[in-house]
Image (spheres, grey):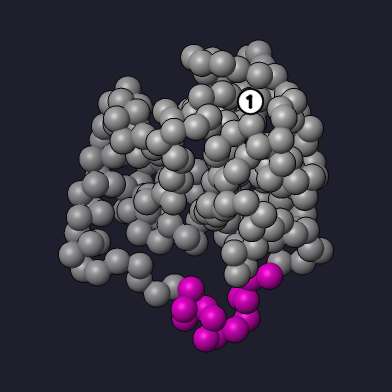
Amino acid sequence: MKQSCNPPKTGLVLEIGSGDNPNPRSNVLVDRFVGSDNRERGGDLVVDRPFVVADAHHLPFRDRAFAYAICSHILEHMDDPVQFARELKRTSVGGYIQSPSEIAERLFHWSFHRWYVNLVDDRLVLHPKEPAEPFGELFDYLYAYNPAYYFFQRSMPDLFWVEREWHGEELQVEVRADSPLPLTDPAALRALVQPRHSLFGLVGLFFFTLVGRLARTDVRRLARRLLGRNYV
């Protein structure tokens, strides 16, 4: 997946909720939960650079201490997303947020997430997640073990991931009672499902995703470090 995470070459970079997969560019890591409880992260906590135990709703840093803040798959966990956004803008000049989309949340088994997240006109719009998970872990297994499904999901990344890179005061987070998805509007649905790549691009993506599925975990980790990305 192409990411719009573009931290500056200079200046301190903060990463909140870095968990088991911190970004190579991050200088300071923050996590609220330490120890062996991995229920809300994909593996054991990585502490390989300056690390601060803190609540992201109340960060222990001075105003504008960081040039950039990376928050990958953390917004959907927050108790108070609006307060979290205030702290990001207070402590950082700019940053990057990535979360599963509402569509992904309804398909996959992430019972510990609190919010559905959508991007509406550059505004992150959240509403409370429903407890029902009708598909169980079906799509988790499709993503892990079926290359055809993995290719489909990678070919339409904005259906499954929400990304927002922000600078200054432009970060806006809003909590609503209901979903903003236009799932009953035929014109909006046709736009939503349009292919994201040319035929040539799809062929290239197919081979990239096939290699990604066949590569060992340590090889993918090395590739992430070399490319400066969280995900490969």
The residue sitting at 66% across, 13% down in the picture is 35
The residue sitting at 62% across, 81% down in the picture is 184
Say which of 100 and 46 sits in front.
46
Q: Quadrant of residue 217?
A: top left
The residue sitting at 71% across, 67% down in the picture is 179
Tell me: 143 left or right of 100.
left
Say which of 134 and 194 sits in front.
194
Q: Is 114 included in the stretch rendered in magenta?
A: no
Residue span colored magenta? 180-192
The residue sitting at 63% across, 25% down in the picture is 30
Q: Amino acid at mark 1?
A: Val
Q: Is 181 included in the stretch rendered in magenta?
A: yes
Say which of 93 and 105 sits in front.
93
Crowding near pointer 1: few (<14 within 10 Å), some, many (20+)? many
Can residue 42 be seen in the rendering of this structure? no
Residue 108: percent from left, percent from top = 57, 48
Residue 167: percent from left, percent from top = 57, 52
Residue 33: percent from left, percent from top = 69, 22
Residue that label 1 marks:
30
Q: Quadrant of residue 39?
A: top right
Seen in the picture, residue 180 relative to 157 is either above or below; the reply is below
Tell me: 226 left or right of 30.
left
